[in-house]
Amino acid sequence: MIKKLERVQFTSPVSGEVVEVVRGEKRKLIEVKVLADKRNEFETFKKHTVSDIANLSADDVKSQLMISGVWANFIQRPFGTIADPAFIPKAIHVSAFDTSPLAPDYSIIFKGQDQFFQAGIDVIKKLTNGPVNVNTHTTSEISTVFSQVKGAEVNKFSGPHPAGCVGVQIHHIDPINKGDIVWTINPFGVIQIGKLFLNGVYDASKTIAVAGSEVKNPQYYKTVTGASVKKFIANNLKSENVRCVSGNPLTGTNIGKEGHLGFYDLQLTVLPEGNEYEFLGWILPGANKLSFHRAWGLLSFLTPRREFKLDTNTHGEPRAFVQTGVFEKVVPMDILPTHLIKSILAEDIDEMEALGIYEVIEEDVALCEFVDVSKHNIQGILRDGLELIRTS
Amino acid sequence: MSFLRNQLDKVKHNFEKGQKWEKFYFAYEALDTFLYAPNTTAEIKGVQVRDAVDLKRLMMTVIIAMTPCLIFGMWNVGHQHNVAIGQPSSVGEEFWFGFLKTLPIIIVSYGVGLGIEFLFSTLRRHPVNEGFLVTGMLIPLVMPASIPLWQVAIATAFAVVIGKEAFGGTGMNVLNVALTARAFLYFAYPSQISGEVWTYLGEGATTVSGYSGATPLALAAASTGDVVSDLNSFGLDGPMEFIRSGTCS
């Protein structure tokens, strides 16, 4: 099933010169560093008016999406890989809110982008025979970007994280069965596609949130995809022993103080690095320890509204996989995550399929990894299972 | 406390890969993580923050939940003993009697079990799992107070090796370890774990005439002659009083 998507191009977010190419094992491409010039010139693509877009064919749309570099915004389920343009998805899903910790407010970072979002929806509608679902939250204020959209089905969800995970939303709208293919795209991708068709440029500019307990001034910044984090943290840190995470604290990547923002990330989180021992840390009670469990000495359940300052310490060491029944409480889907993870450890593909592996990717089980008493890398295990099926 | 940490750090490198005590790494790790929650941080990708709970704390919670059971059990051992020999005494004395009777069983269960855990962690190179802290207390809870200690030791060893380690250790076992110990004794040494073993009498002690170890129904079932007269000769007052006082067989 592994295919190289040769027609899909990846575009530099800025104009300039390539200064470094970082490769990993087996010459795997990891990073291409570009030094931006001052002018920031754009390669121009074909411009369209709103009425033009309505007349475009699916093939025209696809070729422009692929050659311009915006295609990578489409994520395919199952497997959570960049979508294969050879398929026609059953539906396309857009999660229009982010419930993860310290997440940016979409009504702020996408403010005033109404026409681009609408154009983007008009474009991606051509790629599927099914609906385009725009999923919003019931309680938070919904930006007009999403509430006024035409040509898409607007669904409403309620509740805390992981309500914002698009996998959870798909599960409740129209679950993925074996053989189904659906695509997901975040609102930033939709807007980028809208800009491509209306303005004729690959526009990598985005608004991101710089957040976390170690940031002096948490705020939104206008920047571009792949920007270096150096300027965001310069003179803006409360301490030096910190970790810079591209993305949110549940699914993000530690990119270091000189790293670059991820393609899909709209958030830079700076957390205190917890590389310290704690004397009798496994048994001493404390009100400052955040836990989902009601185990001995963990008192955070008494103060459900309190904000905690979390560091990156694992608070324990890896242990055997034991069944606690807690995974099921943090995955609001009709699947059994404990059994799914066990079947992946046993490399039992039939069992993985029966337990719904096609419905989930890493972000959907991130909370399982957070609450795991045995400190396993649950997201990594799930990825191994998905790759096992994908490559078999 | 940094003195202790320094001492641990000083010897730690000896247990790492390629060093002289490499085999004992997990034994060292068990001690180190008992004294100090480790300084490990989240991996590069995935969750960057973790819940404050760990397996040790979870198991400790179970142990705390079992403690009332254990305390009641200790008192009950003393109480049943006193009822049986017809020698009333205070709650405190009854508890102390039961405590002294039960403690050796707990020590043997933990000692043998943890010994085997450490042995296997060295042989099989897996972490010492805290699950045995719970199992080690469950075993005394499912044994009669009159059980010989050597049987506790054998049963615990059998349960940990066959019930757990043979399947790959904690989390992979298909049998409940504590119940495996009990089942082992039930089949290997039935006379010490069935019948009138649940009340500890003591060497040479005689019971009061109204004493019953099993329930009247069990007595009736064991009766060879006339059931009613057997029960009467035993003294109906005794069993009834016994039941009212809260028998636990």
Image (tube, helix red, strand yellow):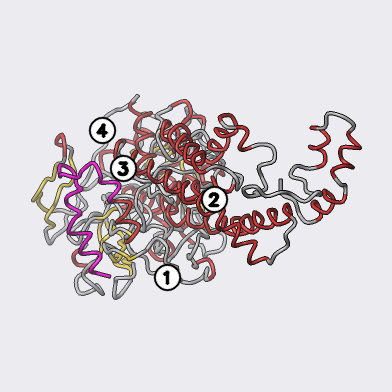
Q: CA distance from mark 3 to mark 4?
A: 11 Å
Q: Which residue is mark 4?
A: A7
Q: Are marks 1 and 4 in contact (CB under 8 Å)?
A: no
Badge 2 element: helix
Circle 3: residue type = Ala
Highlighted magenta segment, given as a residue range: B1-28
Residue A287 in the image: state x and y as whole percent.
46, 71
Asked if the residues shown at circle 3 and circle 2 are in contact, with their CB atoms under 8 angstroms apart, the answer is: no
Chain letter, disc 4 residue: A
Q: Earlier in the sequence, mark 3 or mark 4?
A: 4
Q: Amino acid at mark 1?
A: Asn
Pointer 3 and pointer 4 on the same chain: yes
The number of numbered discs placed on residues in the rendered structure image is: 4
Residue holding disc 2: A329
Labels 3, 2: one chain: yes
Q: Nearer the viewer, residue B120 or A3?
A: B120
Q: Position of residue B75 (x, y in %)?
A: 64, 59
Comes first in the chain, label 2 or label 4: 4
Instruction: Report the Cα–Cα distance between label 2 and label 1.
Output: 23 Å
Q: Taking A10 as reference, is A150 left or right?
A: right
Asked where in the image residue A108 lies, by quadrant, the reply is bottom left
- The verdict on residue A71 being magenta is no
Q: The disc labelled 4 sits on which kind of residue?
A: Arg
Mark 1 crowd level (few <14, some 14–19, many ≥20, 10 Å Cα): some
Is residue B8 rendered magenta in the image?
yes
Q: Chain of mark 2?
A: A
Q: Main secondary structure of the magenta part?
A: helix
* Local crowd size for mark 2, using a 10 Å CA cut-off: few (<14), some (14–19), many (≥20): few
Residue sitting at 77 percent across and 51 percent down? B208
Which residue lies under the disc numbered 1? Answer: A288
Res A151 visible: no
